[in-house]
Amino acid sequence: MSFPADFRWGVATASYQIEGSPYLVGGGHSVWDMFCKRPGAIHDASNGDVACDHFNRYREDCALMKELGIENYRLSLSWPRILPTGRGTIDQAGLDFYDNLIDCLLEHGIDPHVTLFHWDTPYDIYLQGSWLNADISKWFADYTEIVSKKLGDRVASWMTLNEPQVFLGLGYETGSHAPGDKLGQQELLWASHNALLAHGRSAQVLRSNITNGAQIGWAPVGVCSIPASDSAADIEAARKATLEMDSFSIWSLPLWNDPVFFGTYPECINKLWETSYYKPAEGDMQIINQVPDFFGANIYNAPRVRAGADGKPEVLPHPQGMARTIYHWPVTPEALYWGPKFFYEKYGKPIVITENGLGLSDWPHVDGKIHDPQRIDFLTRYMREFHRAGQDGVEIAGYFQWSLMDNFEWNEGYRFRFGLVYVDYETQVRTPKDSAYWYRDVIGSNGDIALS
């Protein structure tokens, strides 16, 4: 009944959400520093200047993770903390912070899993065009060179980019995330190509520099669909909705993973390149085609689809009154069965759930404890579906719960809480929630607690 013997259980965080902004301690500004100053951009008018003060409290947080039985920790590095302007001069104190954090994790028996980019583009890079500048992939490779040479002997796995669909889709299409721009389709396509090149060049650098056999991958949104029934037609419709695309969408899974795994864009994207002002250069697809060692996917929910009259996928509305998180995201545990199943069929790599969790409105109860039974129920349901995928032949390799602690939740500010650990933002006191102790038992039993 248990998960595989070598299955990796962990938690995940992101630099801007927990560390405190690097510009306050000698680093540079990011687009999120810029965005937070924009009136109305953040719902509670907050920012990540202090956040969870992890920069100063990382030793305490490492000890807390050990207490909670955490064996794997997915963290992200802040590009402007290490390179204040995104390139050129290194801030040694910023690089040393991550050097010390990695050592501290290992001292506590925790394997570090490093994400190189989790949305905090250096402000100076933004002023030079950011993801619209063709040189950004080379700058990102230079940044990768610096950190991989410094940390490459101690990291268990590397992820290049986190959720390119989000930092481009919300940051450059809708404008609801930093930097708050609204681009047209042609510019979004070009930005996507540059992001894919950044992954490719970064992966090449990692493979040249790491000395401990660490795995290399990335963590896009695991956009997937759930069949409305067990009929063969509906299952095929969900498969098509997940793995195929017939028009441009920044959120489409094939847009991102087909170039990385197969070295080619879907046909509808190739047609768009024919009329684009800019086009991929010769050799670009070979650079992008750096096949990951695992298929990383951040999955929170998924739509339900059925086969329409012509067999094409037809998205169904969710039932009235269905379970939803505080984000109003639907609770769809089957996403962790069907997503990994479809991904494994097409891409053939071990599946790692690089993020999964839910936002709630948690608070200390009168007994001083934080009771969050909804989180325990949510995670139990999703873990069971992921395990079911494994029982059905999918190679499942790891699960990282989002998130270790409550944090700055992007444009929502501090209104919602995703953590296993409650953070009092005024005192910075950390208090594990009921779910934290439950997850400790899940890890200790290799998942049996969630399956029983």
Image: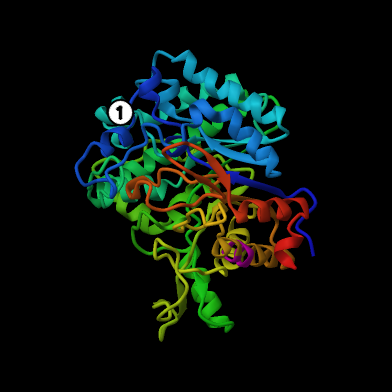
**Residue most toward the left?**
39
Instruction: Please tell me whether residue 191 belongs to the stretch shown in magenta.
Output: no
Picture coordinates of residue 297, whole percent (x, y): 54, 52
Is residue 270 in view?
Answer: yes
The reply, left or right, for residue 370 in relation to residue 439 is left
Residue at x-position 76% and y-position 54%: 446
Picture coordinates of residue 15, whole percent (x, y): 46, 35
The reply, left or right, for residue 340 in relation to residue 387 is left
What span is colored magenta in the figure?
Answer: 377-382
Residue at x-position 41% and y-position 83%: 310
| Quadrant of image for the C terminus | bottom right
Number of residue marks: 1
Picture coordinates of residue 94, whole percent (x, y): 47, 20
Residue at x-position 49% and y-position 75%: 237
Task: Give the answer, above or below, for where 223 lies relative to 432.
Answer: below
Going by the numbered disc 1, the residue's amino acid type is Tyr
Task: Give the answer, above or below, for where 368 lies relative to 158.
Answer: below
For disc 1, the neighbor class at 10 Å (few under 14, some 14 to 19, many from 20) is many
The reply, left or right, for residue 275 in relation to residue 65 is left
Is residue 283 in view?
Answer: no
Residue bearing the label numbered 1? 123
Q: Main secondary structure of the magenta part?
A: helix
Q: Nearer the viewer, residue 77 or 438?
A: 438
**Residue most toward the front?**
366
Picture coordinates of residue 24, whole percent (x, y): 36, 22
| Quadrant of image for the N terminus | bottom right
Q: Indicate the secondary structure of the residue bearing disc 1.
A: helix
Q: Nearer the viewer, residue 62 or 90?
A: 62
